[in-house]
Image: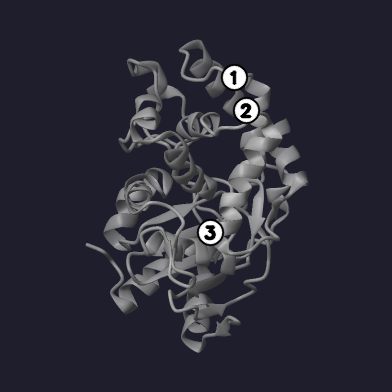
């Protein structure tokens, strides 16, 4: 079913777009720095197959940190609850997503949650497979199934750009390796992680993945339970408590939708039992979230009473 342009959404996008001037693109990753800061688009995917949109929803975006919640779901299915949470915690942090500070004060030195970089690296480390390529293609296959789009791939230029500038993530990996939380070769893990972050799709794909989380892991269009209900529940909980970096508390109060952002400007939203949302707006605030994307979600939540609280 084709995605229909919505007049109401167009008006909300127009209003939210005024805020793009308050943000800047993630130029610390050179390839992401090429994005147009004025871009803003949204697709909403309903469980009956309907889709409404506004903006250029066909423009490809890389998942970046949005991949963290998907890889968590995949690893929970692969490894089980106990294995995963023996190695990564469940608590929010007020620190930036790339901070190393809490690792130094924790005993044992495991990351506080899977949505910060240290935790996401540990989660990616847990993906089963015989090689980086095997592990990556297993994760990619899961993402293609969630989006119902076998054409989804990754952007080699972005992956390379991230790999070459990943020195802070290297530091996190070596710290975690010193404490036996990570046991594999650091460069191989970074190769896998940067490819994971560089998986690209459009807003419609993103909204469809959000819809699967919203529907407790079930694809209502074919009846398949893609992930167990409890895995979807755990992921949505992390989206609420940690999904918007260290702005998650304010986001929960003002908007109240389980969501995960990435520094490409993407936001995946899952309104429980209702629909999924995919947003792209590459101008970021100081926390690393899409400044216009958050405003757009705030307008949606307020106008249609979407907050789960």
Crowdedness of circle 3 by 10 Å Cα count: few (<14), some, many (20+)?
A: many
Q: Residue furthest left?
A: 309
Residue 72, placed above or below residue 300: above
Quarter in which the C terminus is drawn: bottom left
For the residues labelled 2 and 1, say whether their Cβ atoms are less than 8 Å apart: yes
For the residues labelled 3 and 2, say whether their Cβ atoms are less than 8 Å apart: no
Disc 2 from disc 1: Cα separation: 7 Å
Crowdedness of circle 1 by 10 Å Cα count: few (<14), some, many (20+)?
A: few
Q: Which residue is mark 1?
A: 184
Query: Which residue appears at 47% of the width and 67% of the height?
Result: 277
- Whichever of callouts 2 and 1 sits on the residue coming sooner in the sequence is 1
Query: Which residue appears at 65% of the width and 34% of the height?
Result: 192
Residue 143, placed above or below residue 218: above
Element assignment for label 3: helix
The location of residue 269, given as percent across then percent down, is 43, 61
Q: Which residue is mark 3?
A: 146
From the viewer's side, name the closer residue of 30 and 122: 122
Q: Which residue is mark 2?
A: 189
For residue 237, say whether it is visible.
yes
Quarter in which the N terminus is drawn: bottom right
Query: Which residue appears at 49% of the width and 83% of the height?
Result: 11
Disc 3 from disc 2: Cα separation: 24 Å
């Amino acid at each position: 079913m084709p995605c229909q342009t919505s007049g109401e959404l167009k008006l909300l996008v127009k209003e939210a777009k005024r805020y793009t001037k308050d943000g800047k693109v993630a130029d610390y990753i050179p390839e992401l720095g090429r994005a147009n800061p004025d871009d803003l688009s949204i697709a909403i995917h309903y469980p009956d197959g309907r889709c409404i949109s506004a903006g250029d929803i066909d423009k490809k975006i890389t998942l970046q940190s949005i991949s963290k919640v998907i890889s968590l779901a995949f690893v929970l299915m692969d490894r089980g609850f106990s294995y995963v949470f023996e190695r990564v915690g469940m608590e929010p942090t007020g620190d930036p997503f790339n901070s190393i500070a809490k690792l130094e004060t924790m005993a044992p030195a495991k990351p506080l949650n899977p949505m910060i970089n240290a935790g996401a690296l540990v989660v990616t480390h847990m993906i089963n497979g015989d090689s980086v390529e095997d592990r990556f293609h297993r994760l990619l296959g899961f993402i293609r199934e969630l989006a119902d789009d076998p054409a989804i791939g990754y952007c080699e230029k972005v992956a390379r750009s991230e790999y070459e500038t990943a020195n802070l993530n290297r530091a996190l990996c070596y710290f975690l390796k010193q404490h036996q939380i990570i046991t594999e070769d650091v460069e191989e893990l970074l190769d896998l992680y940067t490819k994971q972050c560089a998986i690209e799709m459009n807003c419609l794909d993103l909204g469809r993945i959000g819809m699967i989380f919203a529907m407790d892991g079930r694809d209502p269009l074919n009846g398949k339970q893609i992930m167990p209900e409890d895995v979807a529940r755990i992921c949505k909980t992390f989206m609420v408590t940690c999904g918007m970096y260290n702005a998650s508390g304010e986001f929960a109060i003002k908007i109240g939708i389980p969501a995960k952002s990435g520094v490409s400007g993407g936001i995946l939203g899952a309104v429980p039992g209702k629909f999924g949302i995919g947003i792209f707006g590459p101008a970021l605030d100081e926390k690393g979230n899409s400044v216009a994307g958050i405003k757009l979600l705030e307008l949606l939540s307020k106008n249609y009473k979407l907050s789960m609280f």
